[in-house]
Image (spheres, helix red, strand yellow):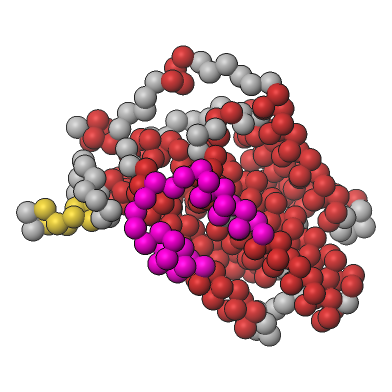
Amino acid sequence: MNLFPFAEYWWLYGAFLAFVLLMLAIDLGIFNRKEHVVSFKEATTWSVVWVMLAMIFAGGFYWYTLGKFGEAAAKTSTLEFLTGYVLEYSLSIDNIFIFVLVFSYFGIPAKYKHRVLFYGILGALVFRAIFIAAGSALMQFHWVIYLFGGFLVLTGIKMFFTSNEEIEPEKNLLIRTFRRFMPVTHTIDGKSFFLKIDGRWHATPLFIALLFLEGTDVIFAVDSVPAIFAVTNEPFIVFSSNIFAIMGLRSMYFMLAGVIDKFYLLKYGLAVVLVFVGLKMVWLNDAFGGKFPISYSLGFIVSVIAASIIFSLLFPRSKPAEETAEPRGLAEELN
């Protein structure tokens, strides 16, 4: 039984969404009105801000749930939010690898990266809401729990044993389909996503990069949304923890983009986490009388992610020669 059914608590969902839209408006309308290169200091500041906002939200959520449903429900719900937030935030780090490759591939100037990511995150919010609504409806059927769990276990195993694949936007079905209907320019002309050339509209590499990132996020959502349903079946907790993780992703990219390749063991940590949450759905919950302790889940996820980061730094790998080669750009692929 959900504590916050949408039909009764629609105002709670609306208030949270209004807060998100307000923060986006402040971001784009005040702090990033002009295109600029996001510094490490600025990115770190915003990363801390988003984490602090998530913690303040968790505190307010605990206080409200305590008064409404009692201490036990408040403690469990808040721990579920924190676990979901940490899980989604960790899985989102994998997106940064893709961001780095895509921006390099399309030759996106540093001062326009924030613009692409802003609209990319905006689209991600819409798609995640759709996925969460669909997942919440499907979770009413008990067999879906085992379907999601098995999928996560297989995904984690595949991630653990397969190497990182190179991105090939020229082979991406979404981009190839889009280019059938609209031509693409080879050069970037300011911050515009579209240009009118000889009376015909053309998409710029900025928009193609945005389109590729949106398609990639949909693929990532196929993993992350079932993963958080392993933590909680409460739609509002799933939605809010997911959104907080996504909102902090842009600043985290600008903070970690230059060093993300150093965390080479993070991939294996994320794989272990996916297998764990999958097993939680198909086995551990039943083994622990219907509900695996949420505090154990939070401790395990944090420990695995922290260990993968720490060991990556303690035992750095030497970079192979082929990894230093420059990626092919969009113009080269289109010629």
Q: Where is residue 135 in the image (x, y as percent from the top left)?
A: 63, 63
Which span of residues is magenta-colored? Answer: 23-52
Tell me, yes or no, whether the highlighted magenta stretch contains residue 97. Answer: no
**Residue 176 or residue 140, whichever sits in front:** 176
Q: Can residue 28 be seen in this view?
A: yes
In the visual, does 60 lie left or right of 251?
A: right
Determine whether, in the image, residue 294 is placed left or right of residue 325. right
Residue 172 vs residue 220: left or right? left
Q: In which quarter of the image is the C terminus?
A: top left
Q: Relative to 193, is 205 above or below? A: above
**What residue appears at the point 39 percent right and 46 percent down from the top-left corner?**
37
Q: Whole-percent x and y of residue 30?
A: 42, 66
- The residue under the point 79% across, 70% down is 62
Percent position (x, y) of residue 221?
56, 53
Q: Residue furthest right?
A: 289
Is 35 part of what is drawn in magenta?
yes
Q: Quadrant of residue 55?
A: bottom right
Residue 306 place in picture, x, y as percent: 73, 38
Q: Quadrant of residue 33?
A: bottom left
Q: What residue sits 68% from the left and 34% below the top?
A: 309
Residue 156 or 192: which is nearer the viewer? 192
Residue drawn at (50%, 34%) of the image? 258
Q: Which residue lies furthest to the left in this view?
A: 198
Seen from this angle, which residue lies furthest front?
41
> In terms of depth relative to the viewer, which is nearer, 294 or 33?
33
Q: How would you classify the magenta stretch by its main secondary structure?
A: helix
State whether residue 138 appears in this view.
Answer: no
User: On screen, 10 above or below 82?
Assistant: below
Above-or-below relation of 118 to 255: below
In front of the other: 22 or 240: 22
